[in-house]
Amino acid sequence: MADLTIEGIGQIKPSSIKGDVWLTCIECGKTYPPFDFVIYRCQKCGGLLEVRYENLPTFEDFSGSGVWRYKASLPFEMGVSIKEGNTPLYTVPRIESDVGVEALRIKHEGMNPTGSFKDRGMTVGVRVVQELGVKRLACASTGNTSASLAAYGSRAGLEVIVLLPAGKVAMGKVAQASLHGAKILQLDGNFDECLDIVTKLADEGEVYLLNSVNPFRLEGQKTIGFEILEQSLEEVGRYPDRIILPVGNAGNTAALYKGFRELVASGALKVKDVPKITAIQAEGAAPIVEAIKSSASHVQRWPSVETKATAIRIGNPVNAPKALPAIRGTGGTAVTVSDEEILAAQCELAEEGIGVEPASAASVAGLRKLRSEGVVGKEEYVVCLATGILLKDPDAASFAREAPKEIPASVEDVMQAILN
Ligand code: F0G
């Protein structure tokens, strides 16, 4: 049963705050001005911070296109923009009928400017940087964050440093970060270790951190949920019962919940209409699933992680304290899928013309599993989030099928090869 709480979201502005935006610690409730100084976590208890607003949006406040259509729910009127958001909601009739749900749509976040949902967060995050006046931006990344930060940071004329786990980032993502001009440091460690190091540098004031621990990034990402609701009403005629997404650092999970709670708090959305947030992790990197299955209050770090879905090869999800309530509060759930199931789902999507990177296909693999277990009902309308585009990981894509055949350049040989 859903146990969604909007406590705090509709909070009255603290008297110490001048504007209509501030930061609140989700653990102890301490509040901070948003742009007076750099802050990532509560100075009192170390808890995660959340952006809070005096005015909460209703659907009537939204106008325009893309992430900035939702400016009434964001800290600025406009950000450093490369026209992010407004991604398509695709039908997949064959998967829909094969899985056996009333309706299935794929929200393809790979159709963003740098090919992943990260752009929604960066358009807001890099705008905050301009407010704070910092010049050197950094992130740890499994790839997509680095590509996005490189593009948005460059566009804003800022220095970008990215820390990547050496040998574990898909080629397309490294190429993007490189071409957009980031300084790429490949570390002999996994993503979590890269994040530990860049967090330390950020705490020492050497860099400004744009990983999803940064609460402003999640503000941009919550617009995925707003778009899904608006598109669903228009294209499917109702809100989804469930949103299924691949989970790594759990930023999206947290962001979707934040957005929905704001709409509930403003009266724009009924609690019963909030989609069940359903998290999918790879078997070899599943600390969130472990915590949900064991009803734990905290996530335990997995020191070693492995999956072919390199984007979600994460053992210490920094947003877990926000993500566990998101899954529980909406009546969602969390399951693991194997690499084989992920790659099969990637092929299935490709057969419907939708090209996604492996991590993205985890949502469809998870839907299959949950439907076969009866957790997802046949009457449900489900939206699966596809987080990144196929071209991010050309190796994974080209090894997924039969290798191209090499044959002599003659009509006969070509015809013979076609028939074989
Ligand atoms: N899918 C893709 C394609 C991703 O790149 C990521 C995260 C996720 C899903 C998981 O999202 O962290 O919000 O749960 N990639 C990060 C990166 C970690 O560095 O690009 P999450």
Image: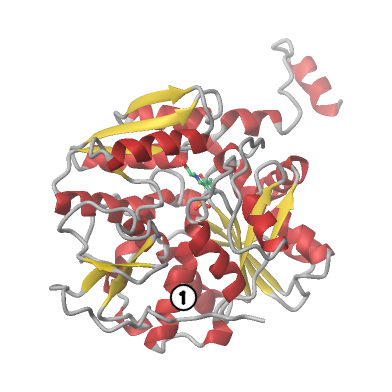
To which quarter of the image does residue 244 belong? bottom right
To which quarter of the image does residue 157 belong? top left
- Residue at 45% x, 77% y is 261
Whole-percent x and y of residue 327? Answer: 60, 68
Outermost residue, top direction?
408
Q: Regarding mark 1 in the picture, which secondary structure is present there?
A: helix
To which quarter of the image does residue 284 belong? top right
Residue at the spot of label 1: 260
Tell me the quarter of the image containing the C terminus.
top right
- How crowded pointer 1 is (Cα within 10 Å; few <14, some 14-19, many 20+) is rated as many
The answer to whether the residue bearing label 1 lies less than 8 angstroms from the nearest atom of ligand 1 is: no
346, above or below 34, in the image: above
Which three-letter amino acid code belongs to the residue tagged 1? Phe
Outermost residue, front direction?
44
Whole-percent x and y of residue 220? Answer: 36, 60
4 with respect to 25 (left or right): right
Whole-percent x and y of residue 227? Answer: 45, 69
- Residue at 83% x, 21% y is 416
Color style of the picture: secondary structure
